[in-house]
Image: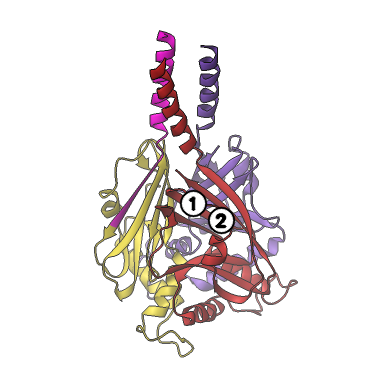
Chain colours: A purple, B yellow, C red
Amino acid sequence: MVVFEQFLVILWRKLTIFRMIQQVEITLQPKSRGFHLVTNEIMRQLPKLPKTGIINIFCKHTSCGLSINENADPDVRVDMETIFNRLVPENRPEYEHTLEGADDMPAHAKSSLSGVSLTIPITNGHLNMGTWQGIYFCEYRNFGGARELVVTIIGE
Amino acid sequence: MVVFEQFLVILWRKLTIFRMIQQVEITLQPKSRGFHLVTNEIMRQLPKLPKTGIINIFCKHTSCGLSINENADPDVRVDMETIFNRLVPENRPEYEHTLEGADDMPAHAKSSLSGVSLTIPITNGHLNMGTWQGIYFCEYRNFGGARELVVTIIGE
Amino acid sequence: MVVFEQFLVILWRKLTIFRMIQQVEITLQPKSRGFHLVTNEIMRQLPKLPKTGIINIFCKHTSCGLSINENADPDVRVDMETIFNRLVPENRPEYEHTLEGADDMPAHAKSSLSGVSLTIPITNGHLNMGTWQGIYFCEYRNFGGARELVVTIIGE
């Protein structure tokens, strides 16, 4: 019986490890139009990460986006805004969806270009991004307001 | 022994919960060139979703794409087509890959811009997208035919 | 007691299956600027894949990217480079981030357009991509050097 008991204790510990999925909904404070480094704003709203796994960050809106890019020189974020505005200019006569403002339809298109969801590896309990990588929140509207994210953590 | 039996029953129930991954291959019916809202066409082909987790939808083709964008005004989908055509125009003299038609190479490039795969959170047994979000299938070919998706559901 | 033993053996086997997450860091050899088919270079550095699941491939850099596109005609990769250069041209007077060379800021923007991370389904122990799909590594710098990827495999 003692052997069985020990066996069951080991089993139980293994099972505890298998509680693999955590999920939280978090809010990003309102931001000006442009590209913002939000790694810290996101991370401080998350529970303790598992040792190994992935994190999925999903933005519940259609006129902003998420991306991963350089975390150092702020000029990169300025130029990103310039480049995305050049890719999808406002006030083009061919646009049909114009009722919500000149910035609205371009914001939708930019959102599909950058995407609204990131999947990042977790290693040794931390996001395993490169030295120069950070999480960008891309606000494509002039006045986007607070933005909601769903964060799903899968790991063990 | 009774205590052991109860313990094993609890263990077994926990294990049943841990059957975490489901996967299905589904088909989208042929669509005209452009952006199509396909949330319902996909969802009705899926098994019951787990309580918490993620879903990955992967498109097995190189001249179409998947995106998440506005589910309300159809004008958004019209303008998306206009904008993507402006981003990657057809019949440019510098293209080398032209044997499969004028729409083919631009379709490949658009596919890399939108991506062919989405990862969406599952919460309380449903896709946890925002109120205005829907799944877009982006058909970049003039005659793309039926398209195959692999859907992987990870949850508990 | 014999029944219990058998039961515990079954439990244990189930638990072994549940070791669901594997993760490795791999290196891609230095590549010329452009789009490269790297399915084989990645796959030969991976452990045996599980029967069913997903693989996430994450690039730890901000001036290159990953994409999925046509694995057959090399002209597609040539035209992809042409198209991405047209989308984000070099040496525009409005760029502010110019200290690291004319190819640097466009490389950051292209990285956000293609993305740096792929999630691909695993079926029957193999990547379940379409017949014509392959993994592209997109080197947006003139001299990018070796590039590091984190590969996370979730499956059972």
Can marks 1 and 2 be said to lie on one chain?
A: yes
Residue C90 vs residue B7, the one in the foreground: B7
Q: Main secondary structure of the magenta part?
A: helix
* Residue visible at 55% across and 73% down in the picture: C36
Report how far apart the C-alphas of labels 1 and 2 lie in the structure: 8 Å
Position of residue B60 measured from the top left corner of the image (x, y, whole percent): 37, 63
**Residue A47 appears in which quarter of the rendering?**
top right
Q: Residues within 10 Å of mark 1 (few under 14, many from 20)?
A: many
Q: Which stretch did the figure color magenta?
A: B1-26
Circle 2: residue type: Leu
Residue A89 vs residue C37, the one in the foreground: C37
Residue A115 in magenta stretch = no
Chain under disc 1: C
Residue C111 bears which disc, if any?
none
**Is there any visible trace of residue B8 in the rendered image?**
yes
Position of residue A124 measured from the top left corner of the image (x, y, whole percent): 65, 41
Q: Does the CB distance between marks 1 and 2 fall below 8 Å?
A: yes
Residue B6 in magenta stretch = yes
Check the image and report above or below for B88 versus A57: below
Residue C46 bears which disc, if any?
2
* Residue visible at 61% across and 39% down in the picture: A51
Residue designated by label 1: C49
Residue B87 vs residue C80, the one in the foreground: C80
| Left or right: C151 in relation to C18 | right
Position of residue A79 measured from the top left corner of the image (x, y, whole percent): 63, 68
- Number of marks present in the image shown: 2
Check the image and report above or below for B51 versus A86: above
Position of residue C20 measured from the top left corner of the image (x, y, whole percent): 50, 41
**Is there any visible trace of residue B133 in the rendered image?**
no
Circle 1: residue type: Leu
